[in-house]
Amino acid sequence: MASKGPEDEHPSVTLFRQYLRIRTVQPKPDYGTNPALSSILLNSHTDVVPVFKEYWSHDPFEAFKDSEGYIYGRGTQDMKCVSIQYLEAVRRLKLEGHSFPRTIHMTFVPEEEVGGHRGMELFVQRPEFRALKAGFALDEGLANPTDAFTVFYSERSVWWVRVTSTGRPGHGSRFVEDTAAEKLHKVVSSILAFREKERQRLQSNPHLKEGAVSSVNLTKLEGGVAYNVVPASMSAGFDFRIAPDVDLKAFEKQLHAWCQAAGEGVTLEFVQKWMDPRVTPIDDSDPWWSAFSRVFKDMNLTLEAKIFPATTDSRYLRAVGVPALGFSPMNRTPVLLHDHDERLHEAVFLRGIDIYTQLLPALASIPALPSDS
Ligand SMILES: CSCC[C@H](NC=O)C(=O)O
Ligand SMILES: [Zn+2]
Ligand SMILES: [Zn+2]
């Protein structure tokens, strides 16, 4: 038989035959026609966050698809969709016989959900990363419930701060002076007042988006041994997300000042402390942005540029000088990352592949730039 359809063929054979169709013929193999130019890096992380299975309508690891076409599963939005969309767009472009001046690399990295410290943070320091010669990167974004797509050009700096207050212990029935709890309460009040100020600033200005103001939440309280023992030490944990225009040195001083104002024996330590916020240019004079945004104009799609409210591996890429945009092609989709019933409609997923199929040629065809030499 000359050619069997893929339906009754072993998938390994199909894959083999697809590989054979890619024209890697010397002396002009089609794996990026101008290796002197910097490459396009398509990054995605493979890890996902845990689930509370009992709150899910379907098993979060079964990839259940309902009768309307919604696919349920941990990672449908964050960000297994994007990994497969990259692969499918590249596969489509290869099957159509395209090749571009710039090489396209895909990285599938671990550990993003716990800070990327043993993932992208290490990888960007490796010679293997430098060998990729990445000139521009795409990484994850967020869904947008409206018709528009969101793209992220920066992100807030994450600071996880543990404030420890020490004071005099004693019997729970007495007015003990200088307790750890009183002083911790003062710091908590100062920080929550800052939180309220930022919340009001966001609420009162419709032009401001979530990522443009700083946020903080009190996420941990630790201390105490018994109801009738005043503890000598108590601590509070805070998750700060600091807007990219904030002077971080000055903000750190402010944190110390709040601790000092609470009294003696109040100290702070950092569990996460990002000090290098970067902004990827999004003006039309920037060739990467110009190519990226032009595709949306040509496809008649609306694009909203924002600051990512949380953190992604893009920060490590930007910090080593690779301009990165956070983009997950999910419009008309509620933001359900890390949530119960995380899901994505198959039509939105498939449309995302179409978008990458337009985006990748545009980015990989940008002619030589001053930054390439
Ligand atoms: C600093 S480690 C935490 C990384 C995590 N990233 C995605 O959710 C976040 O909380 O933003
Ligand atoms: Zn993610
Ligand atoms: Zn996540």
Image (cartoon, grey):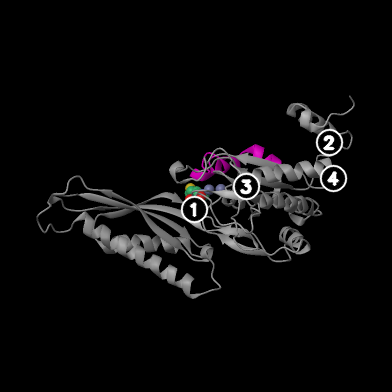
The span from disc 1 to disc 3 (Cα, nearest Å) is 44 Å
Give the number of the mark in front: 1 or 3.
3
* Disc 4 packing (10 Å; few <14; some 14–19; many ≥20): some
Residue, far front: 67
Q: Which residue was labeled with disc 3?
A: 67
Q: Are marks 1 and 2 in contact (CB under 8 Å)?
A: no
356 left or right of 43 in image: right
Callout 4: helix, strand or loop? loop
Q: Residue 22 got which mark?
A: 2
* Residue for point 79% across, 32% down: 6
Callout 1: helix, strand or loop? loop
Q: Which residue was labeled with disc 4?
A: 98
Q: Residue 332 got which mark?
A: none
Q: Report the magenta residues as a range.
A: 111-132
> Mark 4 vs mark 3: which is more N-terminal?
3
Amino acid beneath label 4? His
58 left or right of 227 in image: right
